[in-house]
Amino acid sequence: MHRIAVIPGDGTGPEVVREGMKVLEATAAASGFDFQHTYFDFGGQRYLDTGLTLSDDELEELRSYDAVFLGAIGHPDVKPGILEQDILLKIRFGLDQYINLRPVKLYPGVDCPLKGKGPEDIDFVVVRENTEGLYAGTGGFLRKGTPDEVAVQESVNTRKGVERCIRFAFEYCRRRDRARKLTLCGKTNVLTFAWDLWERTFREVAPEYPDIQTDYAHVDAICMWFVKNPEWFDVVVTDNMFGDIITDLGAMIQGGMGIAAGGNINPEGTSMFEPIGGSAPKYTGKNVINPLAAICAVQMMLDHLGEREAAERVERAVMRVCSHDLRSLSAGRMGKSTTEVGDLVVKYIRET
Ligand code: IPM
Ligand code: MN
């Protein structure tokens, strides 16, 4: 029995979570597993109504679940930073979800903005460190508001944090068992403290994985290669900030925010799965947003919970929808409503 905490959140979050839950139910019936779920109303609306973001007790409650399924956090009437810091990052940090796993996979039938590239060229995974770096929140102001103002934002990199991330990436690369190639993505030529630690750790851990080929790319260069030669990549490991940026680029080459999902992983604790597209306020309530990203998040969650067969079933259904049923993956241009896309995935799950 899997216990799932569900946070629909803001904007189009509830619409895509609704479809994700439909798919989860259909898959449970088809693959024969049980789950229990509880809804939580954390998000911008609750904050505006009550002033509450996420209390320490609520965080503790989330910890008691096997996984968290999140729609989106972010509200146009709330100043940027509050909900991100006090809900999303509080969960990632508080539950020590030290990996942000972001698959970049182009499914057949999906429009790719890269000329001459197809599904055989775009299938890699970014392992993003998820609790440190520039996201650690250290730094501060000096003489704030004066002409002599100083703002310092520091990148925190601990040996433990870097090593557990790199080890996860090697293990993941081995388990994935494709090209067995792990690329470290950094900036050793300029950020000579942080990336010295990363590169040294990478070099020290690598001999334990003689079956994995290793490589290095600067973050600016990897942006070129993702566009020019995405087929070079199998698994990429990087820090929090670089990972944030390159995975948005990755999302675009796999067909956009309509399909991109991610997992915030604590291999020993509670992990959280989410579509990475955000709350999309302008599409809210219109039933036009693409739920496939949320459905792919469900697929990642099932895989993480050990329901491999169920996860594959969901992926096959998503691929079938991509290759047969949609005009585009973009909100409002799918040729189908949010509900209809969810219904099709459910139908294909039942048929296989
Ligand atoms: C992401 C998002 C978050 C991040 C924001 C919303 C805090 O962009 O999940 O990539 O920067 O990690
Ligand atoms: Mn991001």
Image (cartoon, rainbow, N blue to C red):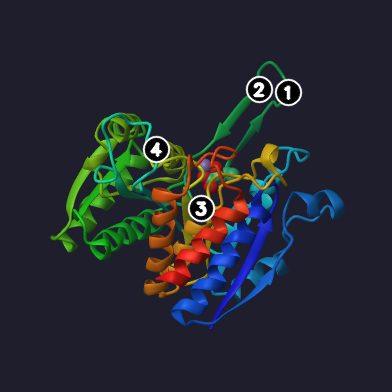
Query: Which residue is identified by label 1?
Result: 145
Question: Is residue 97 at least partly visible in the picture?
Answer: no
Q: Amino acid at mark 1?
A: Gly
Say which label, 3 or 1, has the lower sequence index.
1
Say what amino acid the circle numbered 4 marks: Asp
Residue under label 2, please give it. 149
N-terminal-most mark, 4 or 2 = 4
Q: 6 or 241: nearer the eye?
A: 6
What mark, if any, has residue 111 been given in the picture? 4
Q: Residues within 10 Å of mark 3 (few under 14, many from 20)?
A: many
Near-viewer residue (88 or 314): 314
Badge 2 density bin: few <14, some 14–19, many ≥20, Cα 10 Å:
few
> Which structural element holds mark 3?
helix
User: Which numbered tag is attached to residue 292?
Assistant: 3
**Label located before the other in sequence (1 or 4):** 4
Task: Name which quarter of the figure residue 172 lies in.
Answer: bottom left
